[in-house]
Image (spheres, rainbow, N blue to C red):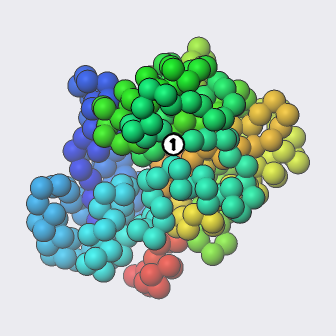
Amino acid sequence: MKIGVVWRKNRNIELHEKYLGISLPDDSEEECLMHCKGIREAGYDVEVIEWYINNPRNTIEKIYKTGCNLVFNASYEEICLLEAFGIPYSGSGIDLVSIDKVVRKMIVAHYGVPTPPFQVFLKNNGEDFRLSIPTPVIVKPVRGRSSCGITEESVVYDSRTAYAQALKLEKALGQKALIETFIKGREITVGILGNEHPEIIALLEIEYTDAVANTFENKKDKEIFHCPPCNIGKKQEKDIANAAITAYKALGARDYARIDFIVSDDGAPYFLELNTFPGLHMKSGNEKNLHSSYIGTMAKSLGWSYSEVYRRIIRHALERYKIKER
């Protein structure tokens, strides 16, 4: 059985470069090769397919010519074309609100999962903009990944500073800003696999070291992982796991995902974000630009091999399409 691994240059850094105005090392090809390694070790043939954003037809033709049974997809940009051409792929689909954090928060709140109070900044709010939610707040883009647009300046305490930060985001990225009450607490991320009956991989706590929030800079190599989380009781762990499964189902995630929570001082878990295509890398020490992924760390804590993560994701995708393994 052949799995096509689709990759695109600068996928992981393009928004960061746009916001920060600097050049960053591109790890997309290295990430692709790590996907290939895991999938081969899981027992599948692999075909590497580069996605050219200005010539999608070329990519679709190559997928057909190589005879891939399934595309291992790791980015939402390709979903529409894969869906339109009826090409089976792993991960969440276009029926999921894949990139709008505001709508996601509204949906999970409807299903009873707490999320921090929020409001959306629009440029036409003008300088008379006022915060309508408790402070401090964190200002972030409504779309993005890997903490894009989140820096130490993102946590603010008044309407005037929130206005300036939101305007900066909108000018740099050309999108609305989500303003959310900043809840000081412990950040817990939850890995999930499956479809009709999703299962928790593990819970992992992210320690920020000297950062106020989990910024882009903090994610590069300053994070400290605790897996399983320290000092979390069984009941609290169960509450977080149940909230994660509810959010996963409510948002229509498929095959695998990761859900982030902030746990307040009173122990309540607040939904922050759903990551539809989270990193899977299990660090070995030979990486050039890649850093340890949360799901890779969870899998390692369970004694899984690198290939086991991919084997499980692919099997869930194949079962969903009713494709029999050969």
Q: Is residue 91 above or below residue 54?
A: below
Q: Above or below — where is 260 with respect to 133?
A: below
x, y percentage for residue 67?
A: 22, 77
Q: Give the residue at mark 1.
A: 120
Please indicate, yes or no, whether residue 239 appears anywhere in the rendered image.
Answer: yes
Residue 231 image offset from top left, x and y in percent: 83, 32
Q: Amino acid at mark 1?
A: Val
Residue 38 is drawn in which quadrant?
bottom left
Q: Is residue 200 at least partly visible in the picture?
A: no
Q: Name the residue at 39% across, 29% down.
A: 167
In this view, which residue lies farthest toward the top?
210
Near-viewer residue (13 or 165): 165
Q: Residue at x 56, y 30 (%)?
A: 130
Residue 290: percent from the left, percent from the top? 38, 34
User: Is residue 307 found left or right of 231 in the rendered image?
Assistant: left
User: Which class describes the residues within 10 Å of circle 1: few (<14), some (14-19), or many (20+)?
Assistant: some
Most foreground residue, 144 or 305: 144
Label 1, secondary structure: give it.
strand
The C terminus lies in quadrant: bottom left
Q: How many marks?
A: 1
130 or 254, nearer to the observer: 130
Q: Is residue 100 above or below residue 185?
A: below
- Quadrant holding the N terminus: bottom left
Q: Quadrant of residue 87?
A: bottom left
Residue for point 54% across, 36% down: 179
Residue situated in front as seen by the camera: 248 or 69: 248
Extreme residue toward the front, this view: 128
Give the left or right position of residue 11, taking residue 204 as reference. left
Residue that appears at 42% across and 46% down: 143
Counting from the top left corner in percent of width and height, residue 260 is at 61, 44
Is residue 255 rendered to the left or right of residue 110?
left
